Amino acid sequence: DAGVTQSPTHLIKTRGQQVTLRCSPKSGHDTVSWYQQALGQGPQFIFQYYEEEERQRGNFPDRFSGHQFPNYSSELNVNALLLGDSALYLCASSTTRTGYTRETQYFGPGTRLLVL
Amino acid sequence: AQSVTQLGSHVSVSEGALVLLRCNYSSSVPPYLFWYVQYPNQGLQLLLKYTSAATLVKGINGFEAEFKKSETSFHLTKPSAHMSDAAEYFCAVTPGGGADGLTFGKGTHLIIQP
């Protein structure tokens, strides 16, 4: 049973550029959440996707946007990159299936983004 | 709104000693609570969760946590520390009944002394 996968593992960009990160949820999961983890900090919630729509958003600017595809995979896009966007970006998946706790999220290994 | 406070950014224990990592939460609705572990350069692994059933929750690798509503706490314990337990530990909260994003604490770095 494959867990949550993310690509790429590492990425280096320069200020002002745009970046797209990808996530495939755990098998059987239909909800994807994205988190930003700055160095030495806990993860911060960016947004959550379910049924191809953004259903909840954290305190992040509109430069952060996302998409969910019919196969439940997801992308995180960040425009006009700032130095402060350098972080580990984590994707987590969960399921709304009956008998499962939809609040339980399983995390991928993350994409480490460095903005120069 | 909810929040999590983890007391002690670093905790050091000897191998074989009791591990106690503290977590206090604030939530306007009955919460669901989680402990995750993060090893260097890796993602987060779920250790255990409280979802309004038994207040004493057992997780993987010998860890357990007790939900105490009166103290708004969800402390993580392990009777005997092992060198492989050295990692970063995060407590997280979310409102029960929904599928909202998790709110994490700042983490506690657990150091195991030989």
Image (spheres, rainbow, N blue to C red):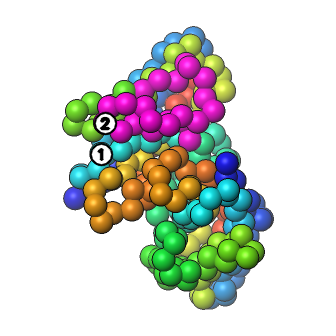
Residue A115 on image: x %, y %: 58, 23
Q: Quadrant of residue A62?
A: top right
Q: Residue at x 65, y 72 (%)?
A: B74
* Residue toward you, B72 or A71: B72
Indicate whether residue A99 is drawn in magenta. no
Per the image, the residue denoted by label 1 is A30
User: Does residue B19 sit above or below A87 in this rendering?
Assistant: below
Mark 2 lies on a secondary structure that is loop
Residue at x 60%, y 88% (from the top left corner): B79
Q: Choose the circle earlier in sequence order: 2 or 1.
A: 1
Q: Is there a contact, CB below 8 Å, between mark 2 and mark 1?
A: yes
Rendered-image quadrant of the N terminus of chain A = bottom left
Which three-letter amino acid code belongs to the residue tagged 2?
Glu
| Highlighted range, magenta | A45-66
Q: Residues within 10 Å of mark 1 (few under 14, many from 20)?
A: many
Looking at the image, which residue is at 58% across and 62% down? Answer: B31
Residue occupied by mark 2: A51
Q: Quadrant of residue A33?
A: top left
